[in-house]
Image (spheres, rainbow, N blue to C red):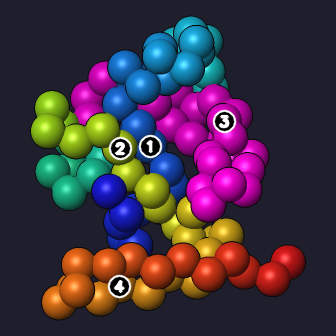
Amino acid sequence: MVDSGADFCIFHAEIGSLLGLNIQKGKASRVGGITGVSQPYFIHPVTLEIGGNKYPIEAGFSKYIADLGHGVLGQNGFFELFVVKFDLLKEEVELKERVR
């Protein structure tokens, strides 16, 4: 999910395990989210591949991500890299890489 209100990128721990990460060996932190309940997550360096380009970022991994979701692309690690345009009626998201 692309979430302009999320501070950072966070994914379900299962995705991290599939990437070969030992989730709990990452830098520990906590996140509250909209429920306000603080849950642990662990930060790891990963590489996003978008449009054939690779972007090294730091992302969080947590086993407390909702069962129906796999993760969130947030401000740090995603929106800082792209100008993002949402077209709700067409159900499209357009990404334009920011000039660094």
Corner quadrant of residue 26 = top right
Amino acid, disc 4: Phe
Find residue 71 and name its label: 2
| Residues rendered magenta in the picture | 42-65
Give me the residue at 51% from left, 55% from top: 8
Tell whether position 47 is magenta.
Answer: yes
State which mark lies toward you, 3 or 1.
Answer: 3
What residue sits 22% from the left and 86% below the top? 90
Using the rendered view, name the quadrant where residue 63 is placed: top left
Label 3, secondary structure: give it.
Answer: strand
Q: Are marks 2 and 1 in contact (CB under 8 Å)?
A: yes
Kind of residue indicated by mark 2: Gly
Q: Amino acid at mark 1?
A: Ile
The Cα–Cα distance between marks 2 and 1, rounded to whole angstroms, is: 6 Å
Residue at (62% x, 60% y) in the render: 51
Is the Cβ of the residue at disc 3 closer than 8 Å to that at disc 1? no
Kindly report the distance in space between the C-alpha atoms of the residues bearing marks 2 and 3. Answer: 14 Å
Q: Residue at x 85, y 78 (%)?
A: 100
Contact? badges 2 and 3 (CB < 8 Å): no
Disc 4 vs disc 3: Cβ atoms closer than 8 Å? Answer: no
- Sequence order check: which comes first, mark 4 or mark 3? 3
Residue 86's disc is: 4
Q: Which mark is residue 46?
A: 3
The tag earlier along the polypeptide, 2 or 1, is 1
